[in-house]
């Protein structure tokens, strides 16, 4: 099969959409498919080249002249390489491909990575729409997308080509450590986690909170930490291209998101054998086997978050049980499973 992935960029900056697309492209090429990625470029280009993926620079920046050049370059690429499947992972790439879709022999597949964004409604015109969870299928169907075009393919990072050569040794953290790996956005629930840590800190005077990630709301979260009675024990680590050392060192890993269609960090944390606390939102319960592989709490509820974290910090036996549970039933979280299910969506689209 001849497959083209459309992305804004291929930078290693913690962007889950780029990470998913790069993983898929590398595995598809490894399995013998002819694979291209079109984007404005980035630090993943050498990784793509090592796996036999062709990268084509097409800048999809939302400026009139850039978009005109992009659609002309995309049309030439599609004709020259006789592409079978165009897989759009971001809205701009989808719109460009949709403009070229009428009467074209190729099929258009769109991945809705963040179904809560209103712009995802634009992707209803794809031949097939991939979501990150069954929950997202229900939500998009309720918003008017044709259910017969929707397919749930859950993210899997176990065996990811991106992670193969990255450091794996546990980070030197002060223990016990509470770790989150997330973009510093309001929807990631960082403020809730800081409030939860402030509440549990007196009962756990040696505990430290590590916030790994970067984002536009960092200054506000740092101000909340400084105002906290336990602020001296809250550490902002910035973006780390290799989060596994933090996941492996964590006494408790926490994902406090208000919206999380299919967070890649949950399979990564499970693969590292972390004791996990997560909010029960969107695709997170599915990635934690509906509470069998991690504790689930309501979103935007710092007291519930504090209670779950304290429960794991206080009981070594229970924490060990949850660490073992995280590593059970991991096969379905492998990138190979995601690859096979994605290929099935492609074949379904081609058979229309």
Image: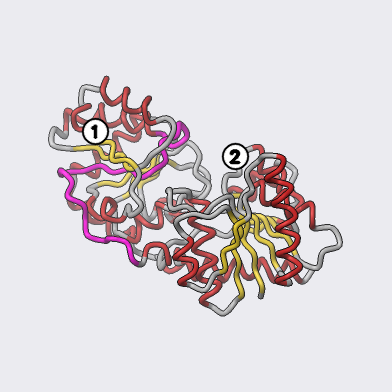
Q: Position of residue 48 (x, y in %)?
A: 49, 66
SS majority, magenta: loop
Extreme residue in the top direction: 227
Q: Is residue 183 magenta?
A: yes
Q: Which residue is mark 1?
A: 234
> Rounded to the nearest whole Å, what is the CA distance between mark 1 and mark 2?
30 Å
Q: Position of residue 280 (x, y in %)?
A: 45, 42
Extreme residue in the right direction: 103
Q: Quadrant of the N terminus?
A: bottom right
The residue lying toward the viewer, choosing from 146 and 45, is 45
In the displayed structure, 61 sits above or below 219; it is below
Q: Residues within 10 Å of mark 2 (few under 14, many from 20)?
A: some
Q: Which residue is mark 2?
A: 116
The residue lying toward the viewer, choosing from 114 and 14, is 14
- The quadrant holding residue 323 is bottom left
Q: Residue at x 39, y 55 (%)?
A: 292
Q: Residue at x 73, y 51 (%)?
A: 96
The residue lying toward the viewer, choosing from 39 and 313, is 39
**Any part of residue 58 in sight:** yes
The colouring scheme, among rainbow, by chain, secondary structure or one colour, is secondary structure
Q: Is residue 164 magenta?
A: no
Magenta range is 165-189
Extreme residue in the bottom direction: 32
Q: Residue at x 79, y 56 (%)?
A: 100
The residue lying toward the viewer, choosing from 58 and 293, is 58
Q: Earlier in the sequence, mark 1 or mark 2?
A: 2
In the displayed structure, 149 sits above or below 187; it is below
In the displayed structure, 66 sits above or below 159; it is above
Please identify, in this view, whether the residue under mark 1 or under mark 2 is nearer the observer.
1
């Amino acid at each position: 099969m001849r497959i083209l992935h459309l992305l804004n960029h291929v930078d290693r900056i913690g962007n889950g959409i780029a990470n998913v697309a790069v993983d898929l492209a590398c595995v598809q090429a490894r399995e013998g498919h002819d694979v291209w990625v079109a984007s404005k470029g980035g630090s993943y280009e050498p990784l793509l080249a090592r796996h036999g993926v062709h990268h084509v620079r097409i800048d999809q920046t939302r400026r009139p002249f850039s978009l005109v050049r992009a659609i002309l370059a995309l049309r030439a690429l599609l004709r020259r390489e006789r592409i079978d499947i165009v897989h759009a992972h971001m809205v701009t790439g989808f719109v460009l491909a949709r403009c070229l879709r009428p009467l074209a022999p190729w099929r258009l597949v769109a991945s809705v990575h963040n179904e809560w964004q209103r712009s995802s409604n634009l992707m209803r015109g794809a031949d097939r729409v991939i979501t990150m969870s069954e929950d997202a299928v229900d939500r998009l169907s309720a918003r008017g997308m044709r259910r017969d075009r929707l397919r749930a393919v859950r993210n899997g990072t176990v065996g990811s080509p991106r992670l193969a050569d990255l450091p794996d040794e546990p980070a030197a953290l002060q223990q016990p450590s509470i770790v989150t790996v997330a973009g510093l956005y309001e929807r990631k629930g960082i403020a809730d986690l800081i409030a939860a840590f402030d509440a549990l800190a007196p009962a756990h005077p040696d505990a430290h909170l590590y916030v790994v990630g970067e984002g536009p709301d960092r200054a506000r979260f740092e101000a909340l930490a400084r105002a906290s009675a336990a602020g001296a024990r809250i550490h902002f680590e910035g973006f780390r291209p290799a989060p596994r050392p933090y996941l492996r060192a964590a006494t408790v890993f926490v994902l406090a998101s208000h919206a999380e269609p299919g967070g890649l960090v949950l399979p990564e944390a499970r693969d590292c054998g972390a004791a996990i606390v997560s909010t029960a939102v969107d695709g997170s319960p599915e990635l934690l086997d509906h509470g069998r592989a991690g504790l689930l709490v309501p979103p935007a509820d710092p007291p519930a978050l504090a209670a779950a974290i304290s429960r794991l910090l206080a009981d070594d036996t229970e924490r060990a049980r949850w660490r073992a549970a995280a590593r059970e039933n991991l096969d379905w979280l492998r990138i190979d499973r995601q690859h096979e299910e994605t290929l099935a969506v492609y074949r379904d689209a081609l058979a229309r």
